[in-house]
Amino acid sequence: MSSKKRRDIPRFETPIIETHCHLDYLDQSELDVTLEKSREMGVERIITIAVSADNLHRVMELTKVSPYIWGTQGIHPHDAASYTPAVDDIIRANAADKRIVAVGEIGLDYHYDLADRSVQCSAFEAQLQAAVDLNLPVVIHTREADDDTRAILQNYSSSLSRKGVIHSFTSSLALAEFCLAEGFMLGFNGIITFNRADNVREIVAATPLSQILLETDAPYLTPVPYRGKPNAPYYLPFIAEAVAAIKAIDIEDLLQQANSNSRALFFSGA
Ligand SMILES: [Zn+2]
Ligand SMILES: [Zn+2]
């Protein structure tokens, strides 16, 4: 609608790992374009995240259509009511596949409260136990649920040998400090490019470089200057730029650190 040209996506040398997006929203032709453009922008691996009993299978399929795509298995707090013993069996069976790199996304969302809070807590706990049993890291979603997230993680953290990431981190500095001290990483996305996100930029500033992951959470949360368009992994360079600016370091150095963090968390078990 606007003829104003947006700044092109910057292309950096260091390969980028997309640690959190939702490719199952795309149809086949959109997927083809997204993969090709992401590769051109230096994205070398993409982790597509499961959220519901309905998309567990689709994530498995996506990891088979391209060697470039990896996946997770898990039930999002919004869908916690669908976490049944039968679904638990599917998650555990699918997670044995080498292309599944984590249990997630799991956690608590008290902003939308789409599932009863006690149901969210039990699904979260059961899936943390699955990650312990499977020796996989976890991808955690938490929103406006700091106290319960902390209480539950406190019980499981020491058993989770590979820890995990709190993705799209927007919670308090206190929760960030707790998670970082427990050895978890924090995932940051386009939110840090938004005007009204000083609180999240403060968390980035407080997070050690060795515990930062980059993600888009596509198709949501498109970074500036492409807000209004659907998000995609090829916008990761904008997120890397924003993190590097907050940390006052060279972008290539930031990308190398983020790449090695991503590999250590998700690709060290194979
Ligand atoms: Zn999430
Ligand atoms: Zn997500």
Image (spheres, rainbow, N blue to C red):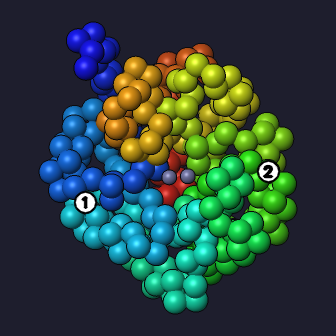
Q: Is residue 182 visible?
A: no
Q: Is residue 194 visible?
A: yes
Which image quarter holds the C terminus? bottom left
The kind of residue tagged 1 is: Pro
Q: Quadrant of residue 71?
A: bottom left
Which image quarter holds the N terminus? top left
Q: Is 210 displayed left or right of 101 in the figure?
A: right
Look at the numbered discs 1 and 2 and tell me whether their residues touch, using CB distance below 8 Å.
no
Residue 201 on image: x %, y %:
65, 26
Mark in the foreground, 1 or 2: 2
Q: Residue at x 54, y 42 (%)?
A: 213
The kind of residue tagged 2 is: Asp
Measured along the vertical axis of the image, is residue 32 above or below residue 41? below
Q: Residue at x 52, y 89 (%)?
A: 86
Give the spatial CA distance, label 1 vs label 2. 36 Å
Measured along the vertical axis of the image, is residue 176 above or below residue 79? above
Q: Residue at x 32, y 28 (%)?
A: 13
Residue 212 on image: x %, y %:
59, 39
Q: Which residue is mark 2?
A: 146
Measured along the vertical axis of the image, is residue 204 above or below residue 35? above
Tell me the element at label 1.
Answer: loop
Residue 150 on image: x %, y %:
81, 57
Q: Which residue is mark 1?
A: 67
Residue 111 on image: x %, y %:
69, 50
